[in-house]
Amino acid sequence: MKERVDQWRFALEGDDDHAIRRQLHSLAWNVASFRCFVQAVRQHPGAEQGAAPLNTNMFWMLHDGFWATTFLSIRRMVDPSPFTGPRGVFSLRSVLDDIRRHQPQLTRQVFVEVVSGLPYDPVPVEKAYWDYVFQQPAGGAFYVPRELDADPIHSRHAQFDVLSGTTPETRRPDDLVRPDVFDRLAARLDRANAIKDHVDTRYAHAATPDSRKNRGLETWNLGEAEEALANLAQTAELISRWFVYGGMGDVLPTPQFDQFEHLDNPWMPHGDMTPLHESWQAFAELSAQWPMIGDDEL
């Protein structure tokens, strides 16, 4: 099981660009940035009177780009594709499904010893701790080696009591995670099904009117995007905490630079739009030639 647990850990917390933690970081950063963009629009003088604070073309590029990226990011994290194999993906759904398949091997003993890397029995650790304490000079502070701390062992057993529906009095090394734990985690991911359908019919595929009928979202706003992100972050935290002895931490990265630098600068400080018009016209002339393909150019 150790090799499989390491694979789950890498998918959730590894340094791969597609690891779940990195996906959450990217999504949280984009949501935070778009919140600031919305605030900037609202702060613009005349915004209350309907004056456009930004060029309409650029405004909709930013708007549409954010929502497309957000929808696709959420869709990726609930992708039901397999975890391994030639079409394997790193998604919360794929990792959860793979963990569920290994439920018969996820005993209490594996949970404590293999997943957590801790001794199963805290009693010898506690004895070693007190033996160490009594060997230290009286009246002064001293360092306690990490391996003499039995609290993590007690905590993991307490967690598994919750997951297995047992008590400290009924614990057994072969206790298993209750199947409904996986059902409830999957139900959290199911909350994104409407987003998945929306992406499948509007972004990943150009669905026909009939095939996209009653599928996807009629309306969606920034608050709902934040709720979806919170749900994914919390679900990822539980899966990581329980099954790889890790955690997601703060999903919004701390900026290592001034993320608002140059926002107070105009895009065209000199006001000369001639280069922009020329660039637009050059592409217009180029694209106008494309439909002129001859029948013999196939």
Image (cartoon, rainbow, N blue to C red):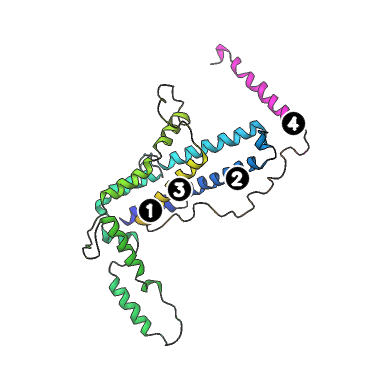
Q: Could you tell me if the residues under marks 2 and 3 are in contact, i.e. CB atoms within 8 Å?
A: no
Q: Which residue is mark 2?
A: 36
Question: How would you rate the neighbour count of disc 4 (Cα within 10 Å): few for under 14, some for 14-19, many for 20 or more?
Answer: few
Q: Could you tell me if the residues under marks 4 and 1 are in contact, i.e. CB atoms within 8 Å?
A: no
Screen quadrant of the N terminus = bottom left
Mark earlier in primary sequence (1, 2):
2
Mark earlier in primary sequence (4, 1):
1
On screen, residue 7 above or below 225: below
**Which is more foreground, mark 4 or mark 3?**
3
- Give the residue at x 50% y 49%: 25
* Distance between mark 4 and mark 3 Cα atoms: 44 Å
Tell me the kind of residue under disc 1: Leu
Q: Could you tell me if the residues under marks 1 and 2 are in contact, i.e. CB atoms within 8 Å?
A: no
**Which is more foreground, mark 1 or mark 2?**
2
Give coordinates of residue 42: x percent, y percent.
63, 41
Residue 26 is left or right of residue 12, and the answer is right
Task: Name the element at disc 3.
Answer: helix
Residue 294 is left or right of residue 45, and the answer is left
Mark earlier in primary sequence (2, 3):
2
Question: How would you rate the neighbour count of disc 3 (Cα within 10 Å): few for under 14, some for 14-19, many for 20 or more?
Answer: some
Q: Which residue is mark 3?
A: 230
Most distant residue in the top direction: 295
Task: Name the element at disc 2.
Answer: helix
Residue range corresponding to the magenta coloring: 269-298
Q: Which residue is mark 4?
A: 275
Most distant residue in the bottom direction: 138
> Relative to the observer, which residue lies in front, 200 or 210?
210
Tell me the kind of residue under disc 2: Cys
Mark earlier in primary sequence (3, 1):
3
Q: Does the magenta segment cover residue 168?
A: no
- Give the residue at x 44% y 87%: 139
Mark earlier in primary sequence (2, 4):
2
